[in-house]
Image: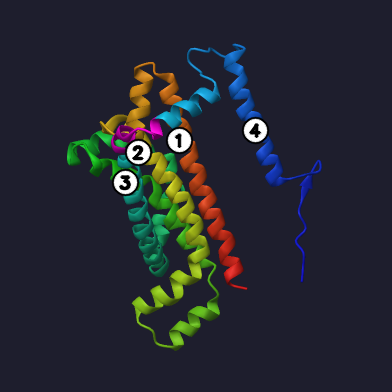
Amino acid sequence: MSTAVVERRLGLTARAWTVLLVLAAAGLLEIAPRVELVDPFSVVPLSEMVTELVALLGTGGFWGDALAPSLTAIAMAFGLALVLGVAAGVLLWEVRAVRAAVEPWLTIYYAIPTFALYPLVVAVMGVGLGPIVLLGTMFAVVAVVTSTLSGLDAAPRTVLRLADSLQMSRWQRTTKILVPAALPHIVTGARLGLSYALIGVLASEFVLSTSGLGHFISRAYNDFAFAQMYAGVLLVLLLATIVNVGFAALGRRRPEANR
């Protein structure tokens, strides 16, 4: 049996440093408004944010008007981005000429201000769930496409030659050989895609919705309800943390399952 060597910096592991930095940031956020290092009117202490968040989570109206619409839109945007991203990645990998034409645009995609398109999206689709899901999908899908391409490029050639020798249909080759071979990279792309879907949906709700967590944060800001605003921001951070921890756990389980 081999034992993994845990790398340390100044006697602490990377995880310990992460915990220490989080605690330091939390302590600073609690103390700074109280000693007026920052404006106590516009920045409330962390304990007040947490108290307000607990109170909001205990009300049915917050779940129905803010949290549920956002979670629904994020799930739909992520699902569409995952399916379309994997399909597009496989298609681009199979058709090299199309990939050569499209891939340069993929590399600069996130430099394009996607949200500048929202007036056009509203003109075509109106307001409501549809344009929010569309913008969230647009923001997330390219991360899945590029990760799928990377995974397929890294697939062993022997496995692909085996699929050819077995005379599999294109569908069988894709579902039984290509996608499983690229799965570790697809999981990484899905992790990024879910984060981007969360960002895209919440940002869209600021301007395109009368419900959802993004709209709740925007309305609280406009009403100078800073405790509620920061409680909403804190909830977004918690959701993003849960997403990343979940995918990190999934990534650790796959190598253990393959032993």
- What crowding class fits label 2: few (fewer than 14 Cα within 10 Å), some (14-19), or many (20 or more)? many
| Residue 200, image x, y percentages | 38, 40
First in sequence: mark 3 or mark 1?
3
Helix, strand or loop at label 1? It is: helix
- Mark 4 residue type: Leu
Question: In this view of the protein, which residue sits in the foreground, 88 or 238?
Answer: 238
In the picture, the quarter occupied by the N terminus is bottom right
Residue wearing tag 1? 235
Residue wearing tag 2? 67
First in sequence: mark 1 or mark 2?
2
- Mark 2 residue type: Leu
- Mark 3 residue type: Thr
Decide whether the magenta segment is chiefly helix, strand or loop: helix
First in sequence: mark 3 or mark 2?
2
Give the vertical position of 152 relative to 21 (above or below): below
Helix, strand or loop at label 4? It is: helix
Residue wearing tag 3? 72
Residue wearing tag 4? 23
- What crowding class fits label 4: few (fewer than 14 Cα within 10 Å), some (14-19), or many (20 or more)? few
Q: Residue at 18% x, 36% y: name it.
A: 123
| Residue 79, image x, y percentages | 35, 55
Q: How is the image coloured?
A: rainbow
- Mark 1 residue type: Leu
Helix, strand or loop at label 3? It is: helix
User: How many numbered marks, from 0 up?
Assistant: 4
Helix, strand or loop at label 2? It is: helix
Residues at badges 1 and 2 in contact (C-beta under 8 Å)? yes
Which one is closest to the eye, mark 3 or mark 2?
2
- What crowding class fits label 3: few (fewer than 14 Cα within 10 Å), some (14-19), or many (20 or more)? some
Q: CA distance from mark 3 to mark 1?
A: 16 Å
- What crowding class fits label 1: few (fewer than 14 Cα within 10 Å), some (14-19), or many (20 or more)? some
Farthest residue, direction bottom? 166
